[in-house]
Image (tube, coloured by chain):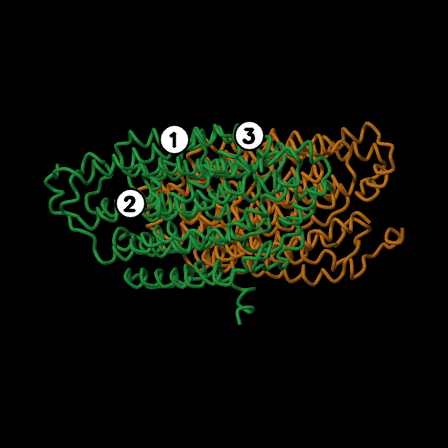
Chain colours: A green, B orange
């Protein structure tokens, strides 16, 4: 029964949001209908995307639900999509977060509502496209396509220095991805194909001429594009600006999914195409990742602005992901993938919570709050739950991933694990301290006394995230048993490489 | 030489010249009718005649495609290449005429010869792409250039427009002289002005020194016409002064035609010293164009610098190998024509009487004042940046991958860095449109039907080339195989 759907499912999941967005163009400007329609489309997409994990063949190797038809004859570009255990969950994460974004933007967006939801849905298509593309060209196509809706969301619907933030975001990622394009073009010029698996096997069998000389540059070309997206330590400066000025839904998708494009790219392309280069460049990359973990956490600690704090915590968390990826161990990569998902859920939820309070008070300054637990008990309960999941309390989602990453890093080099582990402590410090300043004690500002607690709509938006955080923490195997084989595949070139590698 | 023996041209000869003949007839009809009809109401009628003329030229081109081969004593050649450019020129002409409808009314320019000149210009441009004989190419180049010199000065009330016209004329004549001098040297070096014969001589191995000089001089003349650095100085001033629809016209159709000539000279004639000549000029154009555009506050000047940069990207394809360089270059000209003519259509509509509103500031808040117009301009700008789903992306993509296949890694890196820089200034326009508070003093009038059609054609073409580039590229690729035979 499912076989007919299997070959269409990725196309459907990818393009339903776009189709919905285009339909919205024709809608009359009745904001309520527009919101409702966007919600229906994104929910439909989520339900469809659940087909992926439900019918996923866990025992089977390689990419599933693949479609591969020629798109453009010259150059040889294929419409080639498929998912493995890693990308599948990232797709589901995207479709999971988008309806929540629609809900959370219900009231906060009241100007140019139609364009907002059109952009949001187009963004969803582009994000999913990035994760399912197996043709390098298609991948780049979607990769670039994420830029415009995101930049517009920040630039039009953001607050404060939104234009500055949008342009900075656009330029940083655009300039960096141009290097990736150059590397992709080089690979195409030498292999005559954009197909990921074909290029991979051509490289591993040594059929690509001049590869040894070019590989360091190609690796860097890809890596720069991904590192800016993650963002890794010295190129992270666009992130706090983009987050602070972005509308809530923008922040949720930015932190929840967009950043994962970078780490996913490293995992898939840097490791997949250039195992030798990944190995030899690992020391400095890991160093940057650890700097990112500690630096992000320390800077987060001193932020007076709630949203900026969460933004810097993202830098810290994504450092874990990079650390896990470049540990080249099964545990590390499993953990890295899991952190990507967990961070998407928890940080997405944190941004939603920050957005909810912003709607009421129009400020993110921590000092403007204090004692919120009294007027907003339900809100503070949700907030606490998500904070705990984000800082890695056992039985919640953050713990599993970080634990796996750190044990993987220990196996690689003990010092990596030790330094990385301090990040867990820091995250507890800054998150709990922030929580204490915002929620505990007496109400400091009189206006805060009368703040209304969560509305039904807001609760509906938060419950799924909270449930997901709990389920991921209690039953991580639901996710890990499909991630595991994919990671095993991704690590195959490393186990083949030489006896000196992989410390098991 | 069978053809040379015939004194009287055959019917097929005329068919091979049919689009040019059609355009000339319509142009002359316009000139004849112009004095006979009421001046105030002449615009629409003459414009309609010109529009029919350009559409007839498209039909003639399609008809002509069934009769490939040489004509008029081997001076013109109908092949996939010439059909491609004929079609392009005629389509751009039609779109420009549609754009001019409103523009002429708003600017209160009453001159029937405007449409006539556009058609005569199109004659020259069409002929440039089918001529395979250097002297005929020179004549075609002059026909096209002289029409555009005059068209540039059509905003008679604005001093800046007359300045543009004179500047363009003086420098342009100078450049044409260079071209002619190069033709003479080429003749001296190879004993022929036929591109095919020159190609045979130069491909045979022994390349006389004079041929290098000939190629260099011809290249100077042509590089001036396409606004490639260091022969670009005229571009910003002329583009700023000339009427916007005319700028849309002269930044696309004549450029495409000159690139056609350049393709013939460089590839079909096996010009020596091609790669380094192109390398330097392409790198310079991209860099100077993009850096110059960063500093502009006037949208027309900005697009002028952008056109210098795009000439640079396009030239990158000329340094590549013929079998993928030629299709890449042809695809780029088509895409550039679609997006640039569209961008200038928006600029000319928005400029209002006297082209008052052409600064970036005037575009503030266009996104909320005229969402449709802003969205359309955004599509063109994104295409100029080279974002996927638009033709500009594939255009750059083909050019750079062609260059990489020829191992021109350095040039590609320069190009890639340049396209990143370019994103900034195109983006600035988008930022102004969507993220700045609207300024009320720059009014937005509703879009008339003719302009709407013009914009629709440009948008559809830009996006079509961005989603299904295969057919156009494949058609362009035939040229390469024909020439390689």
Q: Nearer the viewer, residue A24 or A241?
A: A241
Q: Quadrant of residue B276?
A: top right
Answer left or right for B229 relative to A483. Answer: right
> Could you tell me which chain the residue with mark 3 belongs to?
B
Q: Quadrant of residue B192?
A: top right
- Checking the image for residue B440, the label placed there is 2
Tag count:
3
Q: Which mark lies nearer to you, 2 or 3?
A: 3
Q: Secondary structure at mark 3?
A: helix
Q: Position of residue A382 (x, y in %)?
A: 25, 49
Q: Nearer the viewer, residue A261 or A17?
A: A261
- Checking the image for residue A422, the label placed there is 1
Say if B334 sits above or below B426 in the image.
below
Do the residues bearing badges 2 and 1 touch, measured as CB atoms within 8 Å? no
Mark 3, residues whose alpha carbon is within 10 Å: few (<14), some, or many (≥20)? many
Q: Are marks 2 and 1 on the same chain?
A: no
Q: Secondary structure at mark 2?
A: loop
Q: Which residue is mark 3?
A: B288
Answer left or right for B433 relative to B278. Answer: left
> Could you tell me which chain the residue with mark 2 belongs to?
B
Q: Position of residue A27 (x, y in %)?
A: 35, 63
Residue in view at x 33 percent, y 50 percent? B368
């Amino acid at each position: 029964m499912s076989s007919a759907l299997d070959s269409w499912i990725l196309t459907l999941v990818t393009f339903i949001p776009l189709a919905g967005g285009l339909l919205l163009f024709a809608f009359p400007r009745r904001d309520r209908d527009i919101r409702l329609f966007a919600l229906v489309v994104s929910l439909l997409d989520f339900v469809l995307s659940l087909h992926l994990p439900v019918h996923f063949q866990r025992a089977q190797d390689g990419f599933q639900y693949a479609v591969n038809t020629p798109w453009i004859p010259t150059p040889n570009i294929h419409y080639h999509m498929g998912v493995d255990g890693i990308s599948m969950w990232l797709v589901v994460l995207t479709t999971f977060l988008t309806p929540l974004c629609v809900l959370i933007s219900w009231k906060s967006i009241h100007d140019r509502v139609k364009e907002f939801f059109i952009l949001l849905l187009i963004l969803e298509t582009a994000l999913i496209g990035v994760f399912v593309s197996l043709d390098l060209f298609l991948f780049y196509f979607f990769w670039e396509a994420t830029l415009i809706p995101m930049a517009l969301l920040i630039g039009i619907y953001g607050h404060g220095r939104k234009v500055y933030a949008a342009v900075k975001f656009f330029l940083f990622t655009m300039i960096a991805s141009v290097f990736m394009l150059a590397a992709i073009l080089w690979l195409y010029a030498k292999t005559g194909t954009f197909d990921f698996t074909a290029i991979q096997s051509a490289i591993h069998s040594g059929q690509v001429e001049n590869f040894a000389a070019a590989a360091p540059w190609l690796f860097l070309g890809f890596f720069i594009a991904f590192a800016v997206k993650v963002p890794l330590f010295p190129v992270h400066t666009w992130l706090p600006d983009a987050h602070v000025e972005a509308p809530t839904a923008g922040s949720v998708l930015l932190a929840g999914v967009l950043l994962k494009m970078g780490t996913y790219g490293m995992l898939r392309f840097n490791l997949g195409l250039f195992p030798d280069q990944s190995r030899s460049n690992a020391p400095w990359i890991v160093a940057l990742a650890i700097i990112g973990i500690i630096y992000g956490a320390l800077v987060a600690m001193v932020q007076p602005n709630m949203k900026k704090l969460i933004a810097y915590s993202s830098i810290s968390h994504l450092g874990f992901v990079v650390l896990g990826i470049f540990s080249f161990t099964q545990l590390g990569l499993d953990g890295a993938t899991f952190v990507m998902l967990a961070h998407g859920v928890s940080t997405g939820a944190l941004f939603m919570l920050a957005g909810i309070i912003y709607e009421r008070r129009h400020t993110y300054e921590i000092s403007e709050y204090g004692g919120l637990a009294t007027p907003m008990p339900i809100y503070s309960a949700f907030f606490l739950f998500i904070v705990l999941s984000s800082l890695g309390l056992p039985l919640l989602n953050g713990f599993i991933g970080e634990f796996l990453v750190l044990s993987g890093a220990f196996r690689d080099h003990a010092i990596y694990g030790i330094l990385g582990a301090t990040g867990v402590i820091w995250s507890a410090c800054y998150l709990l301290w922030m929580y204490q300043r915002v929620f505990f004690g007496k109400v400091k500002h009189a206006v805060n006394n009368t703040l209304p607690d969560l509305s039904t709509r807001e609760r509906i938006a938060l419950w799924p995230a909270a449930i997901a955080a709990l389920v991921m923490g209690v039953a991580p195997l639901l996710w890990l048993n499909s991630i595991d084989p994919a990671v095993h595949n991704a690590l195959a070139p490393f186990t083949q490489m030489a006896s000196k590698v992989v410390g098991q | 030489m069978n053809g040379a023996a015939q004194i009287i041209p055959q019917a097929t000869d005329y068919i091979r010249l049919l689009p040019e003949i059609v355009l000339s007839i319509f142009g002359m009809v316009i000139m004849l009718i112009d004095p006979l009809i009421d001046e105030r109401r002449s615009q629409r009628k003459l414009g309609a005649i010109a529009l029919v003329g350009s559409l007839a030229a498209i039909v003639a081109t399609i008809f002509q495609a069934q009769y490939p081969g040489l004509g008029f004593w081997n001076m013109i050649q109908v092949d996939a290449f010439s059909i491609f450019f004929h079609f392009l020129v005629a389509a751009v002409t039609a779109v420009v005429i549609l754009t001019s409808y409103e523009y002429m009314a708003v600017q209160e320019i009453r001159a029937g010869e405007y449409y006539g000149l556009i058609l005569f210009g199109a004659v020259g441009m069409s002929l440039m792409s089918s001529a395979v004989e250097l002297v005929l190419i020179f004549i075609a180049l002059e026909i096209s250039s002289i029409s555009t010199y005059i068209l540039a000065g059509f905003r008679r009330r604005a001093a800046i427009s007359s300045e543009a016209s004179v500047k363009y004329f003086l420098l342009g004549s100078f450049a044409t002289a260079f071209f002619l001098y190069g033709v003479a040297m080429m003749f001296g070096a190879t004993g022929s002005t036929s591109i095919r014969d020159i190609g045979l001589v130069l491909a045979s191995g022994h390349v006389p020194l004079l041929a290098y000089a000939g190629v260099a001089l011809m290249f100077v003349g042509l590089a001036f016409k396409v606004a490639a650095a260091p022969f670009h100085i005229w571009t910003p001033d002329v583009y700023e002064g000339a009427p916007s629809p005319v700028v849309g016209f002269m930044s696309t159709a004549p450029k495409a035609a000159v690139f056609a000539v350049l393709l013939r000279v460089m590839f079909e004639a096996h010009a020596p010293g091609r790669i380094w000549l192109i390398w330097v000029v392409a790198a310079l154009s991209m860099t100077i164009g993009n850096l110059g555009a960063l500093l502009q506050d006037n949208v027309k000047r900005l697009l002028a610098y952008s056109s210098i940069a795009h000439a640079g990207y396009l030239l990158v394809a000329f340094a590549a190998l013929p079998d993928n360089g030629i299709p890449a270059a042809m695809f780029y000209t088509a895409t550039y024509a679609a997006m640039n003519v569209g961008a200038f259509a928006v600029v000319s509509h928005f400029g209002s009487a006297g082209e008052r509103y052409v600064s970036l500031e005037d575009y503030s808040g266009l996104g909320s004042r005229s969402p449709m117009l802003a969205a359309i301009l955004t599509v063109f700008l994104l295409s100029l940046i080279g974002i996927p789903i638009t033709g500009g992306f594939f255009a750059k993509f083909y050019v750079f991958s062609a260059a990489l296949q020829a191992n021109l890694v350095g040039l590609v890196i320069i190009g890639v860095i340049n396209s990143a820089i370019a994103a900034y200034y195109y983006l600035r326009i988008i930022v102004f449109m969507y993220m700045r508070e609207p300024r009320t003093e720059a009014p937005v009038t509703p879009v008339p039907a003719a302009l709407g059609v013009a914009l629709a054609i440009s948008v559809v073409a830009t996006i079509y080339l961005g989603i299904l580039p295969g057919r156009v590229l494949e058609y362009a690729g035939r040229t390469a195989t024909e020439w390689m035979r």
